[in-house]
């Protein structure tokens, strides 16, 4: 199981410095996040690509339904080329918060879900072969285009996409799990009762369901990434059991440290640096 960490707040240069430190300390990935207005995650990742050689570069997460698909494909493609094939993207519907609603109204989950699917289809089509790709959807369209096309991305047919899978109890069809099954990775959304830890049994149930969906459409079980969002420092989220090995046995291929309770500013940044310098939990 590989290990990564999300940087909750940092400037572009600070992010690049943390990425370099993470690579030195044995981490496998560094992740940014996206909002409508703020530090551009893909600029951060591009800066990090210039000062690292091995560590993978991605997001947790990208609310793809709120991007123009061609803009998103351009940004991810650029980071993949700068890094020599180390980019990936995590997507979901996105959590509503004042940083979004200050600029645009919520269109509703159903619309965001349809826009997410269309955005991903165009993302994959453009990075696959934009010169012949066409698409006509409800919200977006794309026609054949040979105008100043960029070089292909090192990762073919495109940088991997991890998708949030949020099971809905009581419903027959699980569209978010179907979406995750179609792409290259799964981020199970586990929501235990307030104050309770995430359980490995709940995680394994989502993982098993998505693997069954992949098998039904003829997709292999490997390679396929499965992410557990964790906090081995114990302050943001708790797991039961806490040991990474149990989650790896349940199907996790990535352990991603998410320290969302650390605030912006010098003190928060210093604590992020201290945790990155300590190395992945499997090596501590």
Image: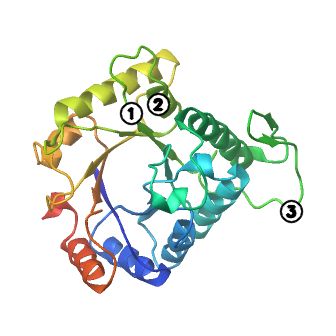
Observer-nearest of 23 and 268: 268
**Residue linked to disc 2:** 176
For mark 1, does the 10 Å Cα neighbourhood hold few (<14), some (14 to 19), or many (20 or more) residues? some
> Which sits earlier in the primary sequence, circle 3 or circle 2?
3
**Residue linked to disc 3:** 148
The percent position of residue 97, horizontal first and vertical second, equals 44, 55
Between the residue at mark 2 and the residue at mark 1, the CA separation in whole angstroms equals 6 Å
**164, above or below 48, in the image:** above
- Which secondary structure lies at badge 3? loop
Mark in the foreground, 3 or 1: 1
Say if mark 2 contacts mark 1, CB within 8 Å.
yes
**201, above or below 185, in the image:** above
- Which secondary structure lies at badge 1? loop
**148, above or below 225, in the image:** below
Left/right of residue 58 with respect to residue 69 in the rendered view: left
Q: Which mark is residue 156?
A: none
The percent position of residue 59, horizontal first and vertical second, equals 46, 58
Who's the residue at 14% across and 58% down the image? 234
Say if mark 3 contacts mark 1, CB within 8 Å.
no
Residue 211 visible to the viewer: yes
Between the residue at mark 3 and the residue at mark 1, the CA separation in whole angstroms equals 39 Å
Observer-nearest of 1 and 255: 255
Mark in the foreground, 3 or 2: 2
The image quadrant that residue 40 belongs to is bottom right
Left/right of residue 15 with respect to residue 120 in the rendered view: left
The percent position of residue 129, horizontal first and vertical second, equals 77, 45
For mark 3, does the 10 Å Cα neighbourhood hold few (<14), some (14 to 19), or many (20 or more) residues? few
> Which sits earlier in the primary sequence, circle 3 or circle 1?
3
**Residue linked to disc 1:** 166
Say if mark 3 contacts mark 2, CB within 8 Å.
no
Who's the residue at 39% across and 19% down the image? 212
């Amino acid at each position: 199981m590989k290990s990564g960490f999300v940087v909750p707040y940092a400037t572009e240069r600070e992010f690049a410095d943390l990425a370099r430190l993470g690579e030195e300390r044995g981490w496998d990935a560094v992740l940014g996040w996206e909002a409508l207005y703020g530090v551009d995650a893909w600029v951060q990742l591009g800066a990090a690509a210039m000062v690292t050689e091995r560590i993978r570069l991605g997001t947790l997460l990208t609310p793809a339904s709120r991007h123009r698909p061609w803009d998103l494909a351009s940004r991810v493609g650029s980071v993949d080329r700068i890094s020599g094939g180390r980019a990936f993207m995590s997507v979901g519907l996105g959590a509503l918060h004042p940083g979004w609603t200050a600029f645009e109204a919520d269109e509703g989950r159903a619309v965001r879900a349809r826009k997410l699917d269309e955005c991903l289809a165009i993302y994959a089509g453009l990075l696959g072969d934009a010169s012949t790709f066409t698409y006509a959807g409800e919200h977006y369209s794309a026609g054949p285009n040979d105008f100043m096309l960029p070089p292909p991305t090192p990762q073919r047919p495109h940088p991997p996409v991890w998708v949030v899978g949020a099971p809905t109890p009581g419903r027959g069809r699980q569209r978010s799990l179907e979406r995750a099954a179609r792409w290259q990775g799964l981020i199970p959304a586990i929501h235990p009762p307030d104050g309770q830890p995430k359980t490995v049994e709940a995680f394994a149930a989502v993982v098993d369901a998505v693997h069954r969906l992949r098998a039904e459409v003829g997709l292999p079980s490997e390679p396929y990434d499965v992410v557990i969002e964790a906090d081995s420092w114990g302050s943001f989220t708790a797991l039961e059991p806490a040991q990474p090995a149990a989650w790896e046995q349940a199907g996790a291929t990535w352990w991603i440290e998410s320290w969302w309770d650390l605030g912006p500013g010098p003190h928060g940044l210093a604590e992020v640096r201290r945790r990155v310098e300590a190395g992945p939990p499997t090596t501590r």
